[in-house]
Image: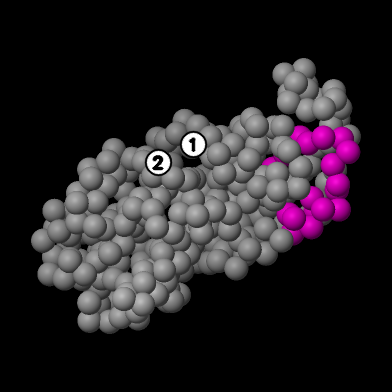
């Protein structure tokens, strides 16, 4: 490597997400340098924009990336393509020792939400960024479960219809399944459920997320609220448009029979959290907070991984 202060990265996928991510790397990365933008459409705006910004490009997909001069210096690649394509990308890049940040629904590697479990996955070869709804809501579920057992967690992600491209629309089932599983695996809920709403309102509305958690009736509400606020602060450190929309709400409820078996009694406490995510508008519009939180989380993940590697190289 010519520069021992930054790790060269490639972005595979020159669509909206890949292009927004490229701009974030160029403007805000602390330990990364933008090496190659990879696409399959020579006429894509993403490749054209990359060329104007002085970034090397290829329209020959993964094969073009591997053939690019300097490929051997690339240690991290973002995959912003599709779940189907990711399987081959992951296999080829692993052979070359390239760590992959997966923004597709493939989920071949462990789920990562930076504010929750990034430190435990800094040495992973392939990590999955879950979904936009997962990035926004899992920190809240985890904040609650850090204080008291969460018997059931349900999240509702409402995004502007105009911010949902063909990939999102084609993968609604994968969104709900992946997010529900991550709510349990990372968030710590016994049972998780995810719902996504494509809001057709004009002008487009900002991303809104609602999180419901059912916990024991005697849970400490002050500690829960403090834990939620602490997680919001952590997420906002890398997603500045992430915020609570109103105060955390607590309501006494009767636990459904299917959930009561997980708790100490038939009554419980419902914790309701309302969130809003405004995009940074680097490339995507501000209402596309659902896409911005994905690229912001991916950038934070890669930056921290690069910092770990740079420290190891210096020590060696």
Q: If you read the primary sequence from the N terminus, does the residue marked by circle 2 or circle 1 appear first?
A: 2
277 relative to 144 in the view: left or right: left
Check contact, mark 2 vs mark 1: CB within 8 A. Answer: yes
Which residue: 31% across, 48% down? Answer: 81
234 relative to 3 in the view: left or right: right
Question: In the rendered image, which quarter contains the N terminus?
Answer: bottom left
Which residue: 45% across, 67% down? Answer: 304
Q: Badge 1 is on which residue? A: 178
Where is 98 relative to 266, above or below? below
**Dot 1 alpha-carbon crowd within 10 angstroms: few under 14, some 14 to 19, many 20 or more:** many
Q: Secondary structure at mark 1?
A: helix
x, y percent for residue 294: 48, 55
68 relative to 123 in the view: left or right: left
Residue at the outermost front position: 316
**Residue numbers of the magenta segment:** 208-229
How far apart in space, not on screen, are marks 2 and 1 (Cα)?
A: 8 Å
Which residue: 12% across, 69% down? Answer: 69
Residue 203 visible in rendering: no
Magenta highlight on residue 144 = no
Q: Nearer the viewer, residue 172 or 255?
A: 255
Which quarter of the picture shows residue 121? bottom left
Which quarter of the picture shows residue 31? bottom left
Q: Nearer the viewer, residue 304 or 154?
A: 304
Badge number at residue 107: 2
Which quarter of the picture shows residue 191? top right
Where is 61 relative to 155, above or below? below
């Amino acid at each position: 490597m010519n520069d021992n202060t930054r790790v060269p990265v490639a972005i595979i996928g020159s669509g909206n997400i890949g292009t927004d991510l490229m701009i974030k790397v160029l403007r805000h990365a602390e330990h990364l340098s933008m090496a190659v933008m990879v696409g399959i459409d020579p006429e894509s705006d993403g490749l054209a924009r990359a060329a104007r910004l002085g970034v090397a490009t290829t329209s020959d997909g993964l094969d073009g990336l591997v053939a690019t001069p300097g490929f051997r210096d690339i240690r991290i690649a973002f995959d912003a393509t599709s779940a189907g394509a990711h399987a081959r990308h992951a296999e080829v890049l692993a052979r070359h020792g390239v760590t992959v940040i997966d923004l597709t629904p493939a989920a071949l590697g462990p789920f990562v939400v930076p504010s929750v479990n990034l430190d435990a996955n800094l040495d992973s070869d392939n990590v999955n960024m879950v979904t936009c709804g997962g990035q926004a809501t899992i920190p809240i579920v985890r904040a609650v479960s850090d204080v008291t057992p969460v018997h059931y967690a349900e999240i509702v992600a409402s995004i502007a219809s105009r911010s949902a491209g063909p990939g999102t629309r084609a993968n609604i089932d994968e969104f709900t399944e992946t997010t529900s599983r991550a709510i349990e695996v990372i968030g710590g809920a016994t049972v998780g459920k995810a719902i996504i709403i494509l809001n057709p309102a004009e002008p487009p509305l900002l991303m809104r997320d609602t999180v419901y958690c059912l916990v024991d009736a005697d849970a400490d509400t002050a500690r829960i609220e403090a834990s939620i606020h602490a997680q919001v602060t952590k997420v906002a450190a890398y997603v500045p448009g992430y915020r609570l929309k109103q105060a955390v709400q607590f309501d006494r409820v009767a636990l459904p029979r299917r959930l009561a078996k997980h708790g100490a009694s038939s009554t419980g406490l419902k914790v309701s959290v309302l969130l809003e995510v405004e995009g940074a508008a680097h490339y995507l519009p501000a209402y596309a907070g659902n896409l911005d939180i994905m690229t912001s989380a991916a950038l934070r993940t890669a930056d921290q991984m690069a910092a770990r590697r740079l420290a190891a190289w210096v020590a060696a």
